[in-house]
């Protein structure tokens, strides 16, 4: 087994050796055997040499520096006829449990309802368009598709003037360009909640900046998202915790092994500033990719409104509160058997109900 050093005393054919010499030789051999018996313990407790490949915890997840490496073959006990491998981190195993992943030869298919289970939503928005988060059917043919073997493109796509959706977070929430549909920085415009997300014109929740809170959940050495070109997106530090330096205009760079990845930043573009990898790009979108299906007409901006509370009140039941002119309004809504029911309650307690069936 790896990590254990075997020692062996060679046999010697002695010719014309006196009895005294033979006795001395036996004493030396016994002394060597005692030393050999003690050495495996010393080797196991000492640090491995720089060139020695030692895996200390076969059950631990690989670090990000191993993410693009060949799977590591683990030694097995004698008498077995199989090996155990530690897979590198890829889109096949990086996503959280609220998503469903299946991988084919060159693509990871990511299914989710687009709603995070890692935090609440909408609270903190001070520029609201009267949209709310609805579950989305990012499943089946409408699942997210992530290339498993990304390739650098000769013609990268910049997010400065184009590109709507560019990534998906490991909690199953889509990530859009930092700019909104008017070309404004959504974060600076006050349109985002405390997690960097909001609901679009199709009541589809998504981020416009990096969901850096996911670093605390998955660890700084793991991706917090994957770009639609297949390259991973890490948080505000390198996977080893060191500062990030040398980012290109797409918010990415190469690691010491020559592997490309993106990073989150606290200033524009906040997330991948485009796509450095090969994609099928059509009409401002990467194809194929999921579509959100609106169930009601898009809302309009409500100047002066601030979203102050959001909660899930039951299975597929939600409540959002906002203030306007120092008064509190409530939107309660449910989703049941493809029927969407919205109740709007004003400060006086008056209620208006709207029902939609796609």
Image (cartoon, rainbow, N blue to C red):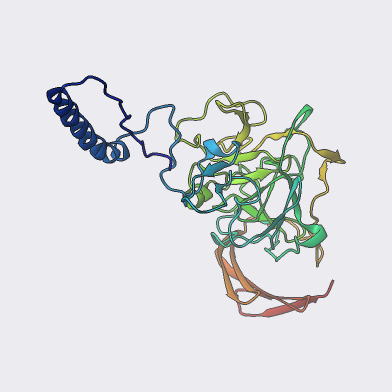
Residue 148 visible to the viewer? yes
Report x, y in % for residue 180.
72, 45
Q: Quadrant of the C terminus?
A: bottom right
Task: Point out the residue furthest to the front here.
Answer: 16
Q: Quadrant of residue 273?
A: top right
Query: Residue 176: x percent and y percent?
Result: 70, 46
The part of the image, by quadrant, that contains residue 38 is: top left
Left or right, residue 289 beside residue 174: right
Is residue 242 placed above or below 210 in the rendered structure? above
160 left or right of 7?
A: right
Q: Is residue 156 left or right of residue 26?
A: right
Q: Residue at x 31, y 36 (%)?
A: 43
The residue closer to the viewer here, 31 or 80, is 31
- Name the residue at 63% across, 77% down: 315
Residue 313: where, in percent of width, then height? 58, 76
**Of residues 121 and 1, the one drawn nearer to the viewer in this rendering:** 1
**Residue at figure coordinates x 77%, y 39% from the top left:** 163
Quarter the N terminus occupies:
top left
Task: Please report the residue visible at 50 percent of the width from the left and 34 percent of the height from the top.
Answer: 238
216 shown above or below 229: below
Task: Give the x, y percent position of residue 134.
Answer: 70, 66
Between residue 76 and residue 262, name the one nearer to us: 76
Q: Count up the numbered dots.
A: 0
Residue 186 seen in the figure? no
């Amino acid at each position: 087994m790896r990590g254990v050093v075997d020692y062996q005393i060679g046999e010697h054919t002695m010719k014309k050796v006196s009895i005294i010499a033979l006795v001395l030789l036996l004493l030396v051999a016994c002394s060597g055997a005692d030393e050999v018996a003690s050495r495996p313990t010393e080797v196991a407790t000492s640090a491995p040499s720089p060139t020695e490949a030692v895996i200390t915890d076969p059950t631990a997840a690989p670090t990000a520096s191993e993410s693009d490496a060949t799977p590591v073959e683990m030694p097995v006990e004698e008498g077995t006829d199989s090996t155990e491998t530690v897979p590198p981190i890829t889109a096949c195993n990086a996503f959280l449990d609220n998503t469903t992943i299946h991988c084919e030869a060159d693509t990871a298919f990511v299914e989710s309802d687009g709603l995070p289970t890692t935090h609440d939503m909408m609270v903190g928005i001070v520029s609201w368009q009267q949209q709310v988060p609805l579950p989305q059917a990012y499943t089946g043919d409408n699942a997210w598709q992530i290339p498993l073997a990304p390739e650098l493109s000769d013609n990268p796509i910049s997010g400065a003037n184009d590109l709507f959706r560019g990534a998906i977070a490991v909690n199953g929430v889509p990530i859009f360009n930092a700019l909104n549909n008017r070309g404004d920085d959504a974060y600076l415009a006050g349109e985002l909640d405390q997690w960097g997300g909001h609901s679009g014109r199709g009541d589809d929740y998504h981020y416009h900046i990096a969901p850096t809170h996911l670093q605390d959940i998955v660890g700084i050495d793991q991706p917090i998202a994957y770009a639609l070109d297949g390259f991973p997106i890490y948080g505000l530090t390198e996977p080893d915790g060191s500062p990030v330096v040398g980012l290109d205009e797409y918010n990415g760079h190469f690691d010491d092994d020559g592997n490309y990845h993106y990073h989150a930043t606290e200033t524009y573009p906040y997330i991948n500033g485009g796509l450095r990898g090969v994609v099928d790009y059509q009409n401002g979108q990467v194809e194929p990719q999921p579509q959100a299906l609106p169930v009601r007409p898009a809302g309009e901006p409500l100047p002066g409104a601030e979203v102050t509370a959001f909660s899930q009140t039951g299975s597929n039941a939600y409540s959002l509160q906002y203030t306007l002119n120092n008064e509190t309004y409530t939107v309660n809504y449910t989703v049941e058997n493809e029927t969407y029911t919205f109740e709007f309650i004003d400060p006086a307690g008056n209620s208006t109900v709207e029902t939609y069936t796609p």
